[in-house]
Image (cartoon, grey):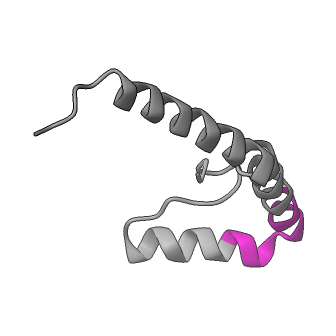
């Protein structure tokens, strides 16, 4: 979900966290840009319409698979 340097930071060490948070603290433009990028990604990939379509497809595929599988006895 996070694209490092685009809509957030992927940090592993305390020093990496310190550096990332320091950059965000000093740069309001970076905060704004990352926020916009994060919101755009969520709206593009994770809206109810998008997830709903994927869920419907998954349920259809599962139902079709179940119809083609012999019942267990």
**Quick check: 2 above or below 60?**
below
Q: Residue at x 27, y 25 (%)?
A: 69
Image-quadrant location for residue 35: bottom right
Examine the structure image and report whether residue 20 is included in the region drawn in magenta.
no
Q: Which residues are magenta?
A: 23-33
Q: Quadrant of the C terminus?
A: top left
Left or right side of 46 for 40: right
Frontmost residue, 25 versus 33: 33
Q: Residue at x 53, y 39 (%)?
A: 59
Residue 23 x, y percent position in the rendering:
69, 69
**Residue 30 appears in the figure:** yes
Residue 58 x, y percent position in the rendering:
52, 36
Residue 48 x, y percent position in the rendering:
76, 53
Frontmost residue, 4 versus 51: 51
**Quick check: 3 above or below 54?**
below
Left or right side of 44 for 12: left
Q: Main secondary structure of the magenta part?
A: helix
Left or right side of 4 for 71: left
Farthest residue in the top direction? 68
Frontmost residue, 11 versus 62: 62
Residue 43 x, y percent position in the rendering:
81, 50
**Quick check: 31 above or below 73?**
below
**Residue 45 appears in the figure:** no
Q: How many marks?
A: 0
Q: Residue at x 38, y 26 (%)?
A: 67
Left or right side of 14 for 47: right
Frontmost residue, 59 versus 21: 59
């Amino acid at each position: 979900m996070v694209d490092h340097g685009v809509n957030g930071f992927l940090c592993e060490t305390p020093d990496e966290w310190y550096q990332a948070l320091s950059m965000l603290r000093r740069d309001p433009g970076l905060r704004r840009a990352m926020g916009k990028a994060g919101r755009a990604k969520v709206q593009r990939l994770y809206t109810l319409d998008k997830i709903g379509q994927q869920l419907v497809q998954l349920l259809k595929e599962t139902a079709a698979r179940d119809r083609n599988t012999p019942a267990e006895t």
